[in-house]
Image: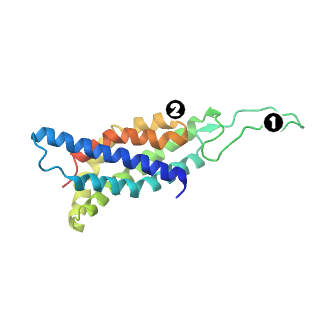
Amino acid sequence: MDSKVTAATVQATVLNALSGVFAQAILAYRRGTTDGIDLSSILRFIVYTVLTTPPNYRWQEFLERMFPTTTEPKHHKSLDDDSNQPSSNAVTGPGGKLNIANTAAKFILDQALGAPINTLLFICLMGQLSSQSYNHIVSSVISDFRPMLFAGYRVWPVVCLLNLVVVPFDHRQLVGSIAGLGWGVFLSLNQVK
């Protein structure tokens, strides 16, 4: 795992652990007691994040490589002048003009493929980490997938669009993880038992 993926995983894990702590604190407050705090729930969120952040980072990297957010600025170059060449990186790009078609393609692919896959992974992995039976996990997928996906569609498209349009690629995972702090609290409070 390269250093960027490692850093993104550590950031996401810390923020997801915090969301679990916040959710447990909210539940304790609602009950009026700290009895019944479920540290295993926080641990499940940590393990889930460690397992899913690297492939999600690579997915975003793939989308950025295939559909760069920005196009190279036009530079007129004389025959003997190489200094006008913009420095470019396959993922972060040269910092040119926003490419609306590429941004729309990334947005659609992320919401149409990434969101359902991540929702399915969440239900299945959390079920496995909770030692649920195969039948119980399948039942959870059937009953919880659609409501959870549509709940996510109330939050993540806005985060995704802002991330794609405003945030440089190297900081998108952090911004997504910060937004995920609140989302993690929601999932913790609504987690299938």
Q: Amino acid at mark 2?
A: Val
How far across and how far down the image is residue 19, in percent?
A: 30, 43
Q: In the rendered structure, are the residues bearing label 1 and label 2 in contact, judged by CB atoms less than 8 Å apart?
A: no
**Residue at the farthest front position:** 34
Q: Residue at x 15, y 42 (%)?
A: 28
Cα separation, mark 1 vs mark 2, equals: 28 Å
Q: Which mark is residue 177?
A: none
How far across and how far down the image is residue 102, in percent?
A: 57, 41
Q: Which circle, 1 or 2, is nearer the viewer?
A: 1
Q: Nearer the viewer, residue 57 or 144?
A: 57
**Residue at the farthest bottom position:** 134
Label 1 element class: loop
Q: Which residue is mark 1?
A: 83
Task: Tell me: residue 1, above or below residue 81.
Answer: below
**Residue at the farthest left position:** 32
Q: Residue at x 63, y 41 (%)?
A: 93
Q: Residue at x 30, y 60 (%)?
A: 124
Dot 1, how many residues are within 10 Å of its Cα: few (below 14), some (14-19), or many (20+)?
Answer: few
Q: Which residue is mark 2?
A: 166
Q: Residue at x 18, y 55 (%)?
A: 193
- The reply, left or right, for residue 77 in relation to residue 26 is right
- The reply, left or right, for residue 56 in relation to residue 84 is left
How far across and how far down the image is residue 152, in percent?
A: 33, 42
Q: Earlier in the sequence, mark 1 or mark 2?
A: 1
Q: Amino acid at mark 1?
A: Ser
